[in-house]
Amino acid sequence: MNTLAEENYLKAIYHLTVNDGNAGTNSIASSLNTKASSVTDMLKKLADKALINYIPYQGVSLTASGQKVALGIIRRHRLWEYFLVEKLNFKWDEVHDLAEEMEHISSQQLIDRLDQFMGYPKHDPHGEPIPDCDGYFNHDELKLVSAAAINQTGVISGVCDHSPSFLQYLDKQELKIGSRITVTDIIDYDHSVTLQLNNKKIHISCEVANNILIANE
Amino acid sequence: MNTLAEENYLKAIYHLTVNDGNAGTNSIASSLNTKASSVTDMLKKLADKALINYIPYQGVSLTASGQKVALGIIRRHRLWEYFLVEKLNFKWDEVHDLAEEMEHISSQQLIDRLDQFMGYPKHDPHGEPIPDCDGYFNHDELKLVSAAAINQTGVISGVCDHSPSFLQYLDKQELKIGSRITVTDIIDYDHSVTLQLNNKKIHISCEVANNILIANE
DNA sequence: TGAAATTTTTAGATTAGTCTAAATTATTTA
DNA sequence: TAAATAATTTAGACTAATCTAAAAATTTCA
Ligand SMILES: [Mn+2]
Ligand SMILES: [Mn+2]
Ligand SMILES: [Mn+2]
Ligand SMILES: [Mn+2]
């Protein structure tokens, strides 16, 4: 089995490489709040275990088995987040750090029964897809609000920033997963966006628009 | 906060001292499957943190704050065991090792909401009392079946041995928490015991009788 | 009560994970 | 294309937790 530190590295590498296939030592270090030299040490261990492809100075990618481990951790993280919100009434801005701890409980049986108990949810409280027990999940086609055209309508289906302060701001604006919004105006000057939500007009900054994902209908 | 190793030591010391107030280095070592020299090292750390009273060569006891920490860990352990059995349909012989991992997730809010979600259970699947958030619990007056007299009736309310093989044996005999039994015979030769359970007669060894607790009515 | 046995502590190593500082390699840019 | 800059690795050290072997203290009991 893998240690807690190894699991955290694998998950970080997964997130860093899921779009562009390669991650550098520095980017891993900053995403884990650690130092580049510590990362180098760990990369050697993960390479020895055949969980990553590592060429010194050239960065890393996950091997098939490393990806499988990473997706297992992400599955556990998202299922626990769902559990905390749906069963224990936590708010969506309160669950991430707790799930960071809970994701390391390694029993396969535990997680599969938790999944069953909750009715096999497909998305976590932030709209992220939950991998099934084989690591498969739907790659939803989502678009940033900041990339939408005027008059475009969509359903809020995800957020890029999971920080409590961002999520609390969305709560205050009543922008939540599942809300149907229409982009009614885009200000040229600062790229801020006006949305129609039910009977309400909401004006959000470019930065906020850049962190909300909508599904086209 | 305390490390995982520190928590395991505190819990072990609690269990070793709950009856007789003092625990020695060797008994702690054997209950944690570690070596006496490792225990001595850790005892110094715990004493520095004022969690135990430690006099070299004289054994240890928990301080008030050490006991509070230990009871918090035991509360978490037993609540997770209850959750696993009642919500996720694990059997009572399957949950202990998993709870050993889960008990170290430290969020107070998590555990209090879990407690509420389950309706504030008073006992875990093995009949052990669950401390409340302040560490209080009922000290049930229980008696070993091996200490009962002929014709005594009681309700199975706890087990001393939590090993899967013992619990599976009890399942096979249909002896479970809540079963009303009567001691109908005690064999002088080997101290084995005959029980009446519903319409059935069950004969158990002295060793088994020594690990079942009943509540007098 | 004083040796023998037992228990406990100390001394010295080891491993995982981390750090700072220095050296090395790769990339940028003038 | 050769400095300058940036990224990465190496060297050496530290902490927590563990181990084995040896020393010291305590307990047992002849
Ligand atoms: Mn999260
Ligand atoms: Mn999430
Ligand atoms: Mn248990
Ligand atoms: Mn139990």
Image (spheres, coloured by chain):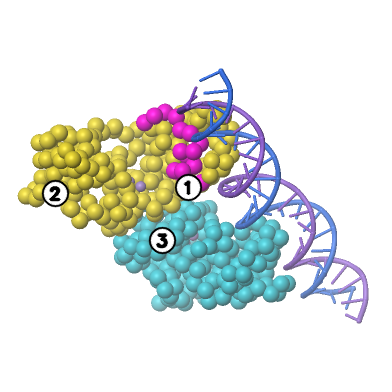
Chain colours: A yellow, B cyan, C purple, D blue
Q: Position of residue D20 (x, y in %)?
A: 76, 51
Tell me the CA gap for discs 2 and 1. 36 Å
Tell me the CA gap for discs 3 and 2. 36 Å
| Kind of element beneath mark 2 | strand
Q: Chain of mark 1?
A: A
| Kind of element beneath mark 3 | loop
Nearer the observer, disc 1 or disc 3? 1
Residue holding disc 3: B107
How crowded pointer 1 is (Cα within 10 Å; few <14, some 14-19, many 20+) is rated as few
Q: As displayed, is residue A86 above or below residue B113? A: above
Disc 1 with disc 3 on a shared chain: no
Which of the pair B208/C26 is nearer the observer? C26
Q: Is residue C7 left or right of residue A181?
A: right
Q: Is residue A155 left or right of residue D4?
A: left
Mark 3 vs ligand 1: CB under 8 Å? no
Residue holding disc 1: A33
Residue holding disc 2: A202
Q: Position of residue B180 (x, y in %)?
A: 40, 68
Q: Is residue B122 magenta?
A: no
Q: Chain of mark 2?
A: A
Residue contact at pointers 3 and 2, CB within 8 angstroms: no
Q: As displayed, is residue A46 above or below residue C17? A: above
Which of the pair B189/A40 is nearer the observer? A40
**Residue B172 shows up from this direction:** no
Write down the region rendered in magenta.
A19-34
Q: Which is more N-terminal, label 1 or label 2?
A: 1
